[in-house]
Image (spheres, grey):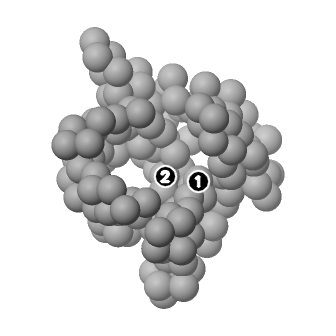
């Protein structure tokens, strides 16, 4: 977990399948708002963002990635659960090695002590504003 006032570096993977994007679901109890984010996680000291991306997908959903391509860097300043947050996101595009991941409706996994859900969502639900993708700059890469 990061400390207040700390800038976090994340490596996230944008995985597409036609009009669908693979995301994890989050919930902010203070705002009472459900949101979605590309999967991935924090970059550890002495680890590259590419290594972090592969490790996070392996740890969280036991998935191997292929065709990994660097897309760019995003900066995200936000409030979650009443706390200010600041992230530098290294964003990659990739594919799953195992085709079974493209057949899933949803996948439950653990992130530390938190239970989370990953799922495929049609990008048009985010573009229309019906569902919230964070950070919103992800839509620039669609």
Q: Position of residue 47 (x, y in %)?
A: 32, 16
Residue that numbered label 1 is attached to: 24
Residue in view at x 63 percent, y 35 percent: 113
Residue in view at x 37 percent, y 62 percent: 82
Identify whether 34 is placed above or below 118: below
Residue that numbered label 2 is attached to: 38
* SS class, disc 1: strand
- The image quadrant that residue 131 belongs to is bottom right
Residue in view at x 72 percent, y 34 percent: 98
Instruction: Report crowding for label 2: few under 14, some 14 to 19, many 20 or more residues within 10 A (C-alpha).
Output: many
Q: Position of residue 15 (x, y in %)?
A: 53, 50
- Assess whether mark 1 and mark 2 are in contact (beta carbons under 8 angstroms): yes
Residue in view at x 68 percent, y 28 percent: 62
Identify whether 93 is placed above or below 125: above
First reached walking from the N terminus: tag 2 or tag 1: 1
Identify whether 100 is placed above or below 83: above
């Amino acid at each position: 977990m990061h400390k207040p006032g700390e800038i976090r570096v994340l490596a996230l993977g944008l995985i597409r399948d036609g009009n669908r994007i693979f995301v994890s679901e989050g919930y902010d109890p203070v705002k009472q708002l459900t949101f979605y984010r590309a999967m991935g996680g924090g970059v550890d000291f002495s680890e590259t963002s590419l290594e972090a991306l592969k490790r996070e997908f392996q740890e969280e959903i036991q998935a191997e990635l292929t065709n990994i391509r660097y897309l760019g860097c995003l900066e995200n300043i936000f409030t979650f659960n009443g706390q200010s947050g600041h992230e530098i996101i290294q964003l990659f595009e990739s594919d799953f090695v195992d085709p079974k991941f493209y057949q899933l409706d949803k996948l439950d996994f653990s992130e530390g002590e938190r239970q989370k859900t990953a799922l495929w969502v049609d990008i048009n639900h985010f573009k229309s504003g019906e569902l919230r993708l964070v950070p919103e700059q992800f839509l620039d890469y669609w």
